[in-house]
Structures are given as structure tokens and as C-alpha cells.
Amino acid sequence: MNAGKKTLYREVAQTVNQALGRKAITPERIARTVEEAHGLRQRRGVFALLQYVNQLPNRYFTEEELEILKAHPRRRELTNRMLAHLVREGIITYTESMMLKRMVP
């Protein structure tokens, strides 16, 4: 994993874990999830990828924790950085990232 990825994944994990007060995710888990998403996109296409992404939050967080994360002041910044990263990795297109940005409240 290159330094840029490692830094981004670490920053996202630290922010989430601090907001929730528990070790909910790790940089390694984020890396595995990104790799799974990449493989899924290649094998089954964009609709399978979207289905996978939609079920991810419920896999790691409770409804109460999701509300805490939605209200976090860095949510939009980190979401935008992760989407840009996914575009660079070839997992989603720029157009798809723009659609996802509009979907995130």
C-alpha cells in the first residue's frame, strides 16, 4: 500500500473511531473493503458494486453510530477524499463519483 493510501485510510479510521468512541474500523479493513469493491466492480459491474456499498454501513455500525457519523464535521471532506481515491483506483468513474456526492446528504 502506498503512503497516500495508507495516510488516507489511517485518517478515516481514526476519525470514525474517535467519533464513535470505539475501534470500529482499521486502515487494513478499509484497504480490504476497497480491494473487494474493485474486484466486485470488475466481475459483476456497477450495480453489484452499488449494492455492496449500500450494505456496508450496516455491516460495521449501528443506526445510532451512523447518525453520529452523518453529523460529524469532517464527513463531507473525508467522503470527497475517499470518492476521489476510488476514482484514481479505477473502482468508480468520475461521473459516478459526482452522482454519489449528490446522494450523500
Image (cartoon, grey):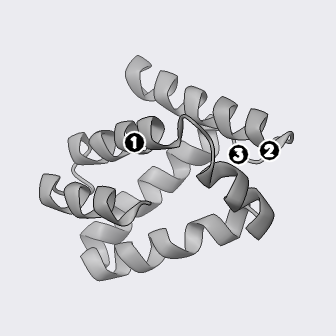
| Residue 92 badge | none
Give the image location of residue 76, x and y in percent. Answer: 44, 42
Residue type indicated by callout 3: Ile
* Residues at marks 2 and 1, CA–CA distance in whole angstroms: 19 Å
Q: Is mark 3 on a helix, strand or loop?
A: loop
Specify which label sits upstream in the sequence, 2 or 1. Answer: 2
* Residue holding disc 2: 20
* Residue holding disc 3: 25
Crowd around label 3: few <14 · some 14–19 · many ≥20 (10 Å):
some
Q: Which of marks 2 and 3 is in front?
A: 2
Crowd around label 1: few <14 · some 14–19 · many ≥20 (10 Å):
some
Q: What element carries label 2?
A: helix
At horizontal 75% and vertical 69% (from top left) the residue drawn is 63
Q: Nearer the viewer, mark 3 or mark 1?
A: 1
Give the image location of residue 4, x and y in percent. Answer: 39, 21
* Residues at marks 2 and 3, CA–CA distance in whole angstroms: 10 Å
**Can you say which quadrant of the picture contains the C terminus?**
bottom left
**Can you say which quadrant of the picture contains the N terminus?**
top left
* Residue holding disc 1: 82
**Front residue of this view, candidates 71 and 88:** 71
Report whether residue 105 is seen.
Answer: yes
**Front residue of this view, candidates 13 and 65:** 65
